[in-house]
Amino acid sequence: MMISFKVYGAKQKCASCVHLPSAKETSEWLEAALVRRFPGSSITFQYIDIDQELEQEEDIHFSEAIKDDEYFYPLIVLNGEVVGEGNPNLKSISLQVEKLTNL
């Protein structure tokens, strides 16, 4: 099964994220950790800058939701489902990936 992550964020850190890594750094860290933890799995990562012009409906939806304060960024989306936001929890995200790899 294809495991597709999208990480939404912006270059500027959110006000409550001052002491946390940037959204881009979080995306890179999460990718490295999950690829290492699930070798051989088809895991893809895409970083989406919410301040750029977006074309895909899903990307527009999540970007607008972040801008409307429905979510904090970085927003972690796995196969279209939100699995983390703000300071994502690697353990809970890993459990979601395990469910998909055990099918």
Image: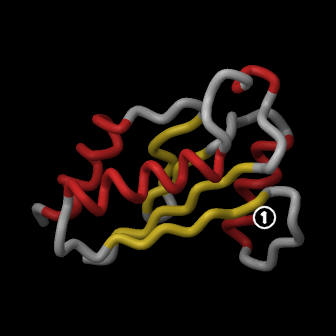
Quarter containing the N terminus: bottom left
In the picture, which quadrant includes the C terminus?
Answer: bottom left
Q: What residue appears at the point 72 percent right and 77 percent down from the top-left corner?
A: 56
- Work out whether residue 36 or residue 86 is closer to the camera in this orientation and state it: 36
Q: Position of residue 26 (x, y in %)?
A: 55, 45
Residue hosting label 1: 60
How many marks the image carries: the answer is 1
User: From the viewer's perspective, is 57 left or right of 101?
Assistant: right
The correct choice, above or below, for 45 with respect to 81 in the image is below
61 vs 40, nearest the viewer? 40
When the figure is inspected, residue 95 is found, relative to residue 32, above or below; the finding is above
Q: Quadrant of residue 40?
A: bottom left
In terms of depth relative to the viewer, which is nearer, 67 or 91?
A: 91
Who's the residue at 76% across and 43% down the image? Answer: 66
Q: Give the amino acid at mark 1.
A: Ile
User: Is 12 situated above or below 98?
Assistant: above
- Answer above or below: position of 54 versus 14: below
* Quadrant in which residue 46 is drawn: bottom right
Q: Nearer the viewer, residue 16 or 92?
A: 16
Indicate the secondary structure of the residue bearing disc 1: helix
Left or right relative to 1: residue 30? right
Give the residue at x 43% y 69%: 4
Please indicate whether residue 2 sits to the left or right of residue 23 in the image.
left
* Other-residue count near label 1 (Cα within 10 Å), few / some / many at <14 / 14–19 / ≥20: some
- Residue 85 drawn at (x, y percent): 57, 37
Q: Position of residue 5 (x, y in %)?
A: 47, 63
Please state the horizontal and vertical placement of residue 33, each as a whole percent of the image: 33, 51
